Amino acid sequence: MIAVEDLKIANMLRRARPVPDPEVPGSYLANGAAAKTGLNRSISDAGWAQFRSILAAKAEEAGRQMISVDPRHTSDRCEACGHAARANRVSQAVFRCVRYEHEAHADEHAARNILRAGLALLAADQAA
Ligand SMILES: [Zn+2]
């Protein structure tokens, strides 16, 4: 079984809206547009939708199931205690639970959360 996040790429690619600065007419506040541009670029580069469709075809060919899971909290919910908080995500690379200080590599931690969610969906599907 292969579990992937059910990312809504169209939403993620939407341009950040300019926010007018109320103090300085005609100028704009920082709104994360630069960060979003970087994210857009990395998603576009990866060709996520194309990657997913190829992966799905390969999985089917190999007789494997591909499961899309809800992407909410995959990166900020603690795998050890279940506590979900943005503060758990210390940096791009580090996950550290603010409740019991469980620490892990952020990407590996998120990957385990995605796998667990996929396995739970699979188990629920088989029980039905
Ligand atoms: Zn925790």
Image (cartoon, rainbow, N blue to C red):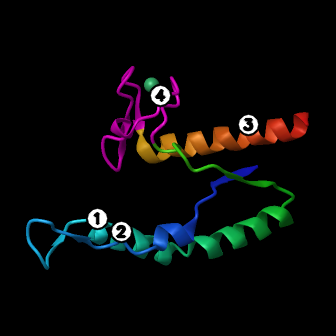
Residue sitting at x 64%, y 76%: 50
Q: Say which residue label 3 marks.
A: 120
Comparing labels 3 and 2, the label whose residue is closer to the camera: 2
Horizontal side of 63 relative to 2 (left or right) equals right
Horizontal side of 61 relative to 29 (left or right) equals right
Q: Earlier in the sequence, mark 1 or mark 4?
A: 1
Q: Which residues are magenta?
A: 76-104
Classify mark 4: residues with Cα within 10 Å, few (<14), some (14-19) or many (20+): some
Disc 1 marks a residue whose amino acid type is Gly
Q: Say whether residue 126 is magenta.
A: no
| Distance CA(mark 2)–CA(mark 1) | 6 Å
Disc 3 marks a residue whose amino acid type is Ala
Q: Position of residue 27 (x, y in %)?
A: 14, 76
| Distance CA(mark 1)–CA(mark 4) | 27 Å
Instruction: State if disc 2 and disc 4 touch (CB < 8 Å).
Output: no
Q: Say which residue label 4 marks.
A: 83
Instruction: State if disc 1 and disc 2 touch (CB < 8 Å).
Output: yes
Quadrant location of ligand 1?
top left
For ligand 1, tell me if the residue under mark 2 lies within 8 Å: no
Q: Position of residue 82 (x, y in %)?
A: 52, 27
Q: Say which residue label 1 marks.
A: 32
Q: Say which residue label 2 marks.
A: 36
Classify mark 2: residues with Cα within 10 Å, few (<14), some (14-19) or many (20+): some
Q: Quadrant of residue 35?
A: bottom left
For ligand 1, tell me if the residue under mark 4 lies within 8 Å: yes
